[in-house]
Image (cartoon, grey):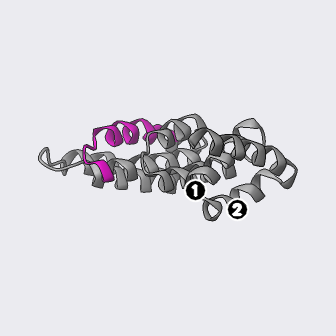
């Protein structure tokens, strides 16, 4: 139904941001209902639609929505690719925090927490730090220090 709505209500003179919102909401809802495979099936359409958004601010939010839907669907690789396309540092930081929370452990989770800290500060990262586990906090702190030195 979401695909049909997007196809029949498409306006070539307008941006595709509304289509991204619809597809992301449906993919997230399906994932939350427990059907990750079906939700992942919508992600290809969602990614193509997000890539078609041309206005800068809407494009950022489209990739943020795609990243969130991919996280909820369990596709962390797509979620990371989408997060890296976000140019707003705060929005990008929150996307990395969501990724870290979903990953829970491992080097990727640690790197994502550090990136969230670097880009969006502590507000975006506290839940992710808790999710990743307190024993990795020293590793995350080292990565955070490395990132802040690189950006200066």
Query: Which tag, 1 or 2, sits closer to the chain's start?
Result: 1
Question: Does residue 19 lie above or below 42 as drawn?
Answer: below
Rendered image quadrant of residue 49: top left
Can you identify the residue that label 1 sits on? 33
Q: Residue at x 47, y 38 (%)?
A: 41
Q: Residue 124 placed where, x, y %?
A: 61, 60
Q: Residue at x 57, y 42 (%)?
A: 151
Q: Judge by depth and name the residue closer to the eye, 68 or 106.
A: 106
Report the residue that reaches farthest toward the front: 152
* Camera sees residue 1: no
Q: Helix, strand or loop at disc 1?
A: loop
Chain part drawn in magenta: 40-57
Main secondary structure of the magenta stretch: helix
Q: Judge by depth and name the residue closer to the eye, 54 or 140.
A: 140
Report the residue that reaches farthest toward the bottom: 123
Report the residue that reaches farthest toward the left: 13
Magenta region includes residue 44? yes
Can you identify the residue that label 2 sits on? 126
Are discs 1 and 2 less than 8 Å apart at CB?
no
Q: Which one is in front in this view, the residue at disc 1 or the one at disc 2?
A: 2
Q: Residue 119 placed where, x, y %?
A: 56, 51
């Amino acid at each position: 139904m979401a695909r049909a709505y997007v196809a029949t209500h498409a306006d070539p003179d307008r941006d595709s941001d509304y289509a991204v919102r619809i597809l992301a909401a449906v993919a997230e809802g399906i994932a939350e209902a427990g059907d990750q495979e079906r939700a992942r099936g919508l992600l290809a359409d969602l990614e193509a639609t997000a890539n078609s958004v041309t206005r800068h601010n809407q494009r950022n939010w489209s990739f943020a929505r795609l990243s969130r839907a991919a996280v909820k669907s369990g596709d962390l690789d797509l979620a990371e690719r989408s997060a890296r396309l976000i140019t707003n540092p705060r929005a990008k930081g929150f996307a990395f925090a969501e990724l870290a929370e979903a990953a829970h452990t491992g080097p990727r989770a640690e790197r994502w927490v550090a990136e969230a800290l670097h880009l969006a500060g502590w507000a975006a990262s506290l839940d992710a730090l808790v999710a990743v586990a307190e024993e990795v906090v020293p590793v995350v702190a080292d990565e955070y220090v490395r990132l802040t030195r690189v950006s200066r």
